Structures are given as C-alpha cells and as structure tokens.
Amino acid sequence: MAKRITNRGVTKEADPSRFLDEYLPYWLSQASYWISSEFQREVSRAGFTFAEWRALACLYGSGGETIGALSRLALMKQPTLSKLVQRLETNGLVGRSATEGDRRQTLVVITPKGTARVANLVERARAHQDEVLRPFGVANARKLLMALQDLVHQHERGRLLGSQAPGDL
Amino acid sequence: MAKRITNRGVTKEADPSRFLDEYLPYWLSQASYWISSEFQREVSRAGFTFAEWRALACLYGSGGETIGALSRLALMKQPTLSKLVQRLETNGLVGRSATEGDRRQTLVVITPKGTARVANLVERARAHQDEVLRPFGVANARKLLMALQDLVHQHERGRLLGSQAPGDL
DNA sequence: AATTATTACATGAATATTCATGTTTCAATG
DNA sequence: CATTGAAACATGAATATTCATGTAATAATT
C-alpha cells in the first residue's frame, strides 16, 4: 500500500469512505468550533475570555441562574463555572446571592455593569450569526436550528445520571 | 419585576425571546457537547480520554497526518496535540516519522496496535450515531449532515489567518 | 423526628491546556 | 546563493480545568 502524504487540514476529502466524513459528532464539533473561533476575535477585543462570554451571554436578560443551571447552559463543569463566577464577581460583572427556596443554591445574577459591558457583544453575535446563516436562506436556517434543538432535547432525557455536570467535549 | 427563580437547566424555555434561544452557535455547542458527552462513557470504558479518542479516530484508516493537520482535524491547538501524540506514541498507539517532502513536518501514523484498540470504539461510534439520528429519518439526517459540512467549508476560507491553530471552544 | 441518602456548591491537589518562544526547515527575493 | 521572512513543530512557564472530596442543606424513610 502506497504511503500517501495527504497533507489536508480539514480540507476536502481524500480517503474513500473515511469514518469521520459520515460521523455526525465530528461535523457538529467542527461547525461549533470554527464558528465560535471566528467570533472569538470579537470576544477578545471586548476584553473577555470565551468562557466569560459564554457565561455572561447565558445570564444576559435572565433573572438569574443557579450555579448548576448555569454550568449546563454554559457547558462547563460545575467547579470550573464556580471559579469563573468568582472572577466575574470580583470584576463586578455578576452578583451572587442565595435563592429563596433552597439555601444550598447560589443564584448568579448579571449586574447592570455586566449587562452594559456585554450588550454590544450580544449585538455583534446576532450580526455574526446572520452573516453565517445568510447563505442558507431563512427557511433552511430555521430548519437547521430546529434540528439542533431537537438533538439537544432528545439528549436531555438521557441525562440526569451523568457525573458532575457537563463532561468535556 | 418579580424575581423569578427559574431553575431550568438547559430545559425548555422561559424568558420570552431569550437571546440564546435563537443563537445558532449556542445550539451547535449544546448539541455537540451532549452528544459527545453521551459517547464519552464508551470512550472511558475503552480506556481512552476523549482527546485521545478524537485523535485516534482522525488517524483511523488514514495514511497518516501531520501534526498541524491533525490538530485541525481533532480540534486541538498544536501544542496540545503535540503532547498528546507523544503520550500516544509512548503507549505504542501511534508512530511518528518525518514526511518525505518537508523535513519540518512530523507525520503521525496510527499503529496496528492502535487500530486494533480503537476498532471496536469506531463501531460503537457508528452505532451511537445511528441511534441519535434515527428519530430524524434518513433524509433529514443527511440534510443535517450536509448543512453542517456547508458551515464548516464556508469557514475554511475565512481561516488561514488565525493564530496558532484552533482557538478554544 | 431521627436517620440516611441525595443534592448544590466550594475548594485543594493533580492534571491538562495554552501562550510565548525557540529551533529547524523551507520559500522568496535581491 | 545569501538573506530575509514565514511555516512546522517542540517545549517550558503560566494558566485553566478537572477530579476528588468536603460542607451544608434538603428530601426520603423508618
């Protein structure tokens, strides 16, 4: 068998029937990764890490989330998020308090300062998404979004047994 | 405004018009994350970390990839992958050599031992994907896959200027 | 209501990732 | 062909994540 030196990056195909080419999780990861990477420039320019952006975006416009809920929304494990929230609190971008019902829970709320600092970025995020989806057309874009939502909802049921919140990517 | 304690995880909606609910990268990340998480149990059971699985899956059936190409395929930054490959080499799952044309490049090749150790996992991955996609039907599944591929290809052009390979998720 | 199990979060130690940079090789230019 | 610039990979120091566990509060059971 000839040793081919196919120096492809993510580029095109090559091997006939490569496992990955038909593997949904691979393409999901790729799509997610590159789209987020592209937007990360904006995030950095705004002075945030990507994790911070994620957390703040989840809190933006929300009445507050518990640590656990936020860790699922922002796709970080609970200890990771716990520490991130502490940093954000130090910077005055979020506040923490106890929930009324359950005193074990910590409620994380975005502060006015936090809201102000991300508002622009949220707009840019919307714009970026529109740009990315433009080639698809409104109808197809909507179908794609719904398909992804279906996938997620489908997997919400299987959850509830997993270890300590999210498990790496 | 009443302070709602909506303890939703990723669950259903709540706030009318939450930014995230219409935000494609969010759903891409969620879908990618949960599907991969689910499969991670199998990966752990097989004795691999998820990063190892990713790298080996990319090499599986391939004639070899350079460090750079593999870092893009497996969505890790170059230094991360470099170190991972070293560990895999120590365990005899991959081999490293120079490419013929360019002596700067390192060619990473999966060994027979490596192939043997992941073969089963690859089959399980296929099965897992089939299970995940079943509710969609063949036609819709194919559309989803193609849409994701379109997204990735669309962003391959914009690349080539980014920093040191992939940028975090 | 006491006991046991479970959940939510925090935290320290271990591990992994990332950034910045160095070395080597290749490509381009005069 | 010497020189300058860029690319591919490796590596050490700084940083971040993760695992394992601890504490406190709640829920369930007897």
Image (cartoon, coloured by chain):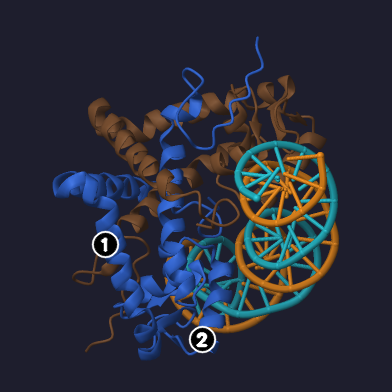
Chain colours: A blue, B brown, C cyan, D orange
Residue B146: where, in percent of width, then height?
A: 31, 34
| Residue B34: assigned label | none
Q: Nearer the viewer, residue C13 or A147?
A: A147
Locate residue B3 relative to residue A162 in the image: left or right: left
B41, A29: nearer the viewer:
A29
Q: Secondary structure at mark 1?
A: helix
Place of residue B75 in the rendered image (x, y in percent of width and height, measured from the top left): 55, 46
Callout 2: 10 Å neighbours few (<14), some, many (20+)? some
Of the 4 image quadrants, the one containing the N terminus of chain A is top right
Residues tagged by mark 1 and mark 2 found on one chain of the structure: no
| Residue A41 placement (x, y as % from top left) | 46, 65
Q: Nearer the viewer, residue B152 or A149?
A: B152
Which residue is at the front of the view, A34 or D20? A34
How busy is the neighbourhood of tag 1: few (under 14 within 10 Å), some, or many (20 plus)? some
Q: Residue at x 51, y 63 (%)?
A: A76
Q: Which chain is disc 2 placed on?
A: A
Residue of label 2: A89
Per the model, the C-alpha gap separating discs 1 and 2 is 25 Å
Q: Which subunit holds the residue at mark 1? A: B
The residue positioned 66% from the left and 23% from the top of the image is: B115
Q: Residue at x 27, y 46 (%)?
A: A150
- The residue that disc 1 covers is B21
Q: Quadrant of residue A30?
A: top left
Residue A114 left/right relative to B81: left
Q: Position of residue B97 (x, y in %)?
A: 77, 29
Regarding mark 2 in the picture, which secondary structure is present there? helix
Residue A149 seen in the figure: yes
Left or right, D14 with reference to B10: right
